[in-house]
Amino acid sequence: MAQAGVIKGTVPAAGSVERSMDGRISRIRLFTCIGLVAVWEIIATLGSYGILYNDVVPHIWNIVIAVGYELISASFYRDLGMTFAAHSVGFICGSAIAVAVGIWLGTNKLIREAMLPYLNAIGSTPKIIFLPIIFLMFGVGLESKMAKGALSAFFPVVFTTTLGMMLINPVLIRVGRTFNLNKWQMITKIYMPAMVNPVITGFRLGVAITIIGVLVAELKFSDGGLGYRLGIYYEQFEIAPMYAVILLIFALAAAANTGMTKLQDRVNRHMAPTTSKGKKARASASGGLGVVN
Amino acid sequence: MADILQIKNVSKTYDADGDNPVHALDGVDLNIAEGEFVSIIGPSGCGKSTLFNIIGGLIDDHDGEVLIDGREVDGAHKDVGVVFQEESTFPWRSTLDNVAFPLEVEGIDKAEREETARKFIQLVGLEGFENHFPAQLSGGMKQRTAVARTLAYEPRIMLMDEPFGALDEQTRMLLGDKMLEIWAALNQTMLLITHNITEAVQLSDRVVVMSYRPGIIKEIIPVDLPRPRTSEVIATPEFGTYVGKLWTLLREEASRGMAEAEASIAAR
Ligand SMILES: Nc1ncnc2c1ncn2[C@@H]1O[C@H](COP(=O)(O)OP(=O)(O)OP(=O)(O)O)[C@@H](O)[C@H]1O
Ligand SMILES: [Mg+2]
């Protein structure tokens, strides 16, 4: 009884501490944002008097207007479409191959030991050094961007898949054997669900890295795409539109990452409750133990 | 009653051709009658889990024979269900789906398998937690989920490797009563590995005492306490006699094990 009282007393207290923490966090974020805008505007104003960074830092309203122009211009959507196509085709091809290779490496120790040094070496090299080869092989067009995207997507996915395959809890496989699962059931009921989490983690990293890979290729050498658009504005010294494209790319990349994180959380919602909601569920489960016993 | 399980001269050496062969079991002979409740007790590392893996058909490179109904075991066997010592629930499945797993594998339709699963969830005292996931359960609750899952498979022989090791003494006793109820209701043959002398005496018809390195059967103690039994039996003087007898046997083993461990540390 006394114990129950203690628990009842601490839980709301912990909750309110968390809430006031949340409040402080969003206040700090707001002030940071206001501060950045203020500094930006000061530099921009100085610039327009020719004092500092002449014309490099446009006023924020000019950037906002430029964003508006981008959003109503057809050529922006053409470039967006090209980047999107390169990204999605590259990501899908690269990660599909990576999942297959990862499963193979995860299950075959001999091949894994043999191949891992190469994979590690290439995986930790900036893939930008392969750009000339890719341009030579695939040309200036969309194909080279897709190839670069695939190359970028491949490595994070192959590493997480291989590791996920190696780390499957062996006792779960023994459970499958004692219940007489056939090969197909082993794959669909044990290996696949156990692999979902590591593979999704790889996908999340892969999506982010593929964006970088495609943009770099577009910036370097291309006839379209958001990276190309950014490069053109830069070369023509159209500073406000350049910032507008940077902002839009930033927003798109952040949205993609948020989407993938949400997806991962959804998939993982039962695995390790780290969110406050999960903690609550765990607390209620251990609280319930007393009832059962 | 006829012997459902015969273990004949079973030996097992891990890494036999390697640099550090481990002689885990040496010439184990044991016959188990149908419907019997037998506990196996012995120092850590004496080969208890190894023996279960052999009976369950999960290890095949061993010497000697394991027979079920007189036929040699070859691979996993429909008549044998194993509850592993390690945490073994599927983290992506709810309690209900974990327990229904063996039935799902057998192709039993959803409504029917869930009904059966609920019955076994209730038997192990987990009602109300059907929709919880393992990450939301305590260690002991996860083990009970695993017990329920193997019960749902309805094997004739249940092998349970320290299923209640993660529980406090009181809960363990109450679950012991529950286990005896289940055993009486389902007519299964139960083999239980435990480190707990009280638990072994409380539940078993016979207690098998194993000794350390290589694992051999040191002695088999029949427990002649009346059935049906409940945990109240621990208050009787006969119970105390059995506990004392087992402790005497195990103390020698345990101190020998500790001495060997100390010697190997000193040798390093
Ligand atoms: N896969 C393996 N490879 C090599 N040695 C093993 C393996 N499994 C177990 N052993 C060794 O065999 C011996 C018996 O192990 P086992 O797991 O059967 O012991 P146990 O009696 O179940 O111990 P505990 O009570 O601690 O669970 C131990 O010395 C262990 O180190
Ligand atoms: Mg063991």
Image (spheres, rainbow, N blue to C red):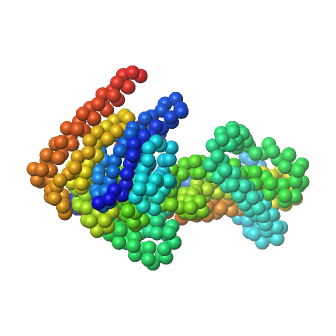
| Above or below, B125 relative to B251 | below
Residue A163 seen in render: yes
Q: Report the front residue among A233 and A254.
A: A254
Q: Name the residue furthest bottom.
A: B111
The image shows residue A189 at horizontal and vertical percentages of 54, 63
Residue A155 against residue A22 in the figure, above or below:
above
Whether residue A288 can be seen here: no
Q: How many marks?
A: 0
Tell me if A49 is positioned left or right of B48 in this view.
right
Displayed quadrant of residue B182: bottom left
Instruction: Decide: is A23 above or below B63.
Output: below
Q: Position of residue A29 (x, y in %)?
A: 53, 56
Quadrant where the C terminus of chain A is found in the figure: bottom left
Determine the image quadrant of residue B246.
top left
In the foreground, A206 or A199: A199
Q: Residue at x 42, y 50 (%)?
A: B66
Q: Is residue A197 left or right of residue A61?
A: left
Relative to B190, B108 lies left or right: right
Find residue B216 and report its horizontal and vertical position in percent.
Answer: 34, 39
Measuring 46% from the left and 54% from the top, which residue is drawn there? Answer: B73
Q: Residue at x 31, y 47 (%)?
A: B40
Lateral position of residue A1 relative to residue A194, left or right: left
Residue at point 51% right, 60% down? Answer: A180
Query: Which image quarter: residue A140?
Result: bottom right
Q: Position of residue B210 (x, y in %)?
A: 31, 41
The N terminus of chain A lies in quadrant: bottom left
Outermost residue, left side: B237
